[in-house]
Image (cartoon, helix red, strand yellow):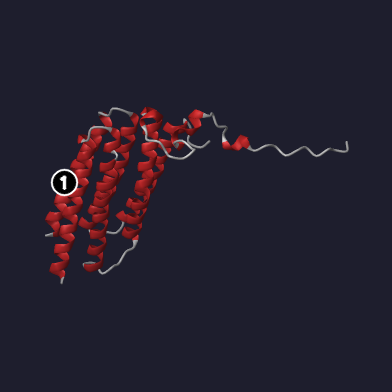
Amino acid sequence: MIHYALIFAFGCFGLGLLFNLYRIFVAPGVVDRVLALDTMVINIIALLVLYGISTHSGVYFEAALLFAMTGFVSTVAYCKFILRGDIIE
Amino acid sequence: MEFLAEIVISVLLVAAGIFGLVGSIGLIKLPDTMTRLHAPTKATTLGVGGVLIASMLYFWIFKATLSWHELLITMFLLLTAPITANFIAKAHLHRFGKESDLPDTKTDRGWATFEDEAKEMQPVMTRVTPPAQAPSDH
């Protein structure tokens, strides 16, 4: 049963990733692109954890943790750049 | 017992997948940036939280190893999602918003996002007044 639920979740998050890619290419402004990138990072974290379940290995949590941290820092850096024109003043 | 755990984990995974998909569809469908901000920061974060809790239960029950990594990632995501949403909303207001569109703050200070446009503030590093020079004997 877990196998089919895993396939369903893989499909959902993969489709979500495609929607985010579309939003990155077709966006009304730079803020929407930053938002789409942030959502993409979150979806990739979910895919990594799902892959970790399906291969029964715990190695992928470190990768997911790294993705979470770099995703947060990069989003804040982008927004800081839009707000102030500089990242570290 | 294991059958019950399988049902719980499967339900968590399916619900998480639906929440993640709804968040990404909202990013496409909703009409403007401020409403689009809601979908990914709430629905997708909840979806990832569901996946991580399902993974934690799976490794706990079927592999007999309780790992705290998932809880750490969930905490981190739940803590950082509001911060990124706030930053993105501030950036959007900075680029496209006007202070006249926003409601009054009901205090003597205006909106913090527009403060440094109203009166050109100095950067923090140069605002400190230099200490008075001590008179030298030479």
In the figure, is residue B89 to the left or right of B129? left
- Which amino acid type is marked by label 1? Gly
Tell me the residue at 36%/38% (across/down).
Answer: B88
Seen in the picture, residue B13 relative to B39 is either above or below; the reply is: below
- Mark 1 residue crowding within 10 angstroms, few (<14) / some (14–19) / many (20+): some
User: Which image quarter is the C terminus of chain B in?
Assistant: top right
Tell me the residue at 39%/40% (across/down).
Answer: B87
Using the image as rendered, state which of residue A21 and residue B41 is in the foreground: B41
Residue at the spot of label 1 = A11
Give residue A74's quadrant in the image: top left
Tell me the residue at 25%/33% (across/down).
Answer: A23
Q: Secondary structure at mark 1?
A: helix
Q: Position of residue B29 (x, y in %)?
A: 20, 35
Give residue B12's quadrant in the image: bottom left
Residue furthest bottom in the image:
B1
Using the image as rendered, state which of residue B43 and residue B51 is in the foreground: B43
Q: Position of residue B55 (x, y in %)?
A: 24, 59
Q: Position of residue A9 (x, y in %)?
A: 17, 50
User: Which image quarter is the N terminus of chain B in?
Assistant: bottom left
Residue furthest right in the image:
B138
Q: Position of residue B106 (x, y in %)?
A: 43, 39
Give residue B98's quadrant in the image: top left
Seen in the picture, residue A84 relative to B71 is either above or below; the reply is: above
Q: Is residue B125 visible?
A: yes
